[in-house]
Amino acid sequence: MRRKNKRLAAVLAAVIFSAAAFLSVVGALRPDIRYGVRMALSEVSSGIKVKEVSPSQLEMKEIDLRDFEINDDLILVNKDHPITDQEEFEKSLADYKGTGVLMNERAAADYSAMSKAITDDTGHELWVMSSYRTEQEQQQINEEQGSATAMPSGCSEHQTGLALDLYFTGYAGGSILRCEGGRYLADNCSQYGFIMRYPPAKEGITGIEYEPWHYRYVGLPHSKIITSSGMTLEEYLDSLEEGKYYSYGDYILTRTVSDKVMVPEKSTVEISRDNCGGYIVTSKVN
Ligand SMILES: [Zn+2]
């Protein structure tokens, strides 16, 4: 009996040792897998949290949304929230540094800074595989690739100019995280207003499989909140309730469906459509 137990313990130890050895070899050879597992299992903490605040705690003034230029930073586009006004997005497109790569003009400025930081810090150069797509181009991709990786026409963020499929020379698609530049991008994108839009283990929410190459511009501070909390854009927008106020660092956020809204008196205000019938108002307190 005792001998049997000893043999069992020896077998168990061998199994555990082999599993640990296997995982460390996989971890060493495939930093992308290691990275994906870490992202799926752990929530990164930024130290700053979003807090609900009462507007009575702040000095406020009323603004009329119609006096502001409305942007698309936080627009939700998926199968449940298709876009119906393709022309609106075309108005905000910029030709990135004259390369012929079309992207949203707000995203372009921050993309430029992010791309430079990656090259300065890692020596790797970031490239755009796919950015803005017309309705017809999206339709064609959906027919070719199927709906697990490509949204039907009208439901793709690529039609907004806010989504970018990125790569490094020799490291495209699922292998992007095998490159040091790719891991730097994933770790630092939120500083520049970008999020990894389809993270691992969130397919049930986003409707799209893990895509470590697809980045979406949402602007600051939203990129930092989304990334540090481990939420998807769907979950983040769900967490912002209409009429409530939230603070994050120097920012006060609120969501509204009406034209008039209260914002902090001394603040710089930016307003985004949400494609859910309302607006997200982002005020940076001066
Ligand atoms: Zn994409």
Image (spheres, rainbow, N blue to C red):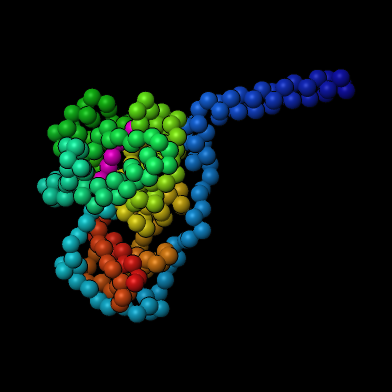
Please, which residue is most extreme toward the right here? 2
Which segment did they paint magenta? 162-167
- Residue 76 seen: no
Query: Residue 181 location in percent, x, y?
Result: 41, 36
Inspect the magenta stretch and tell me whether residue 165 lies in it: yes
Residue depicted at 23% across the width and 24% down the height: 144
Q: In x, y percent, where is residue 117?
A: 37, 45
Could you tell me how many numbered marks the image carries? 0
Q: Is residue 136 left or right of residue 192?
A: left
* Quadrant in which the N terminus is drawn: top right
With respect to residue 201, does 218 lie above or below? below
Place residue 276 in its image quadrant.
bottom left
Instruction: Give the quarter of the figure containing the C terminus.
Output: bottom left
In the displayed structure image, the side of residue 277 where residue 234 appears, left or right = right
Residue at image coords 52%, 33%: 34
Residue 248 image offset from top left, x and y in percent: 42, 64
From where the camera sits, is residue 64 visible?
yes
Give the quarter of the image for residue 253: bottom left
Point 28% across, 39% down: residue: 164
User: What secondary structure predominates along the stretch shown in magenta?
Assistant: strand
The location of residue 145, given as percent across then percent down, is 27, 26
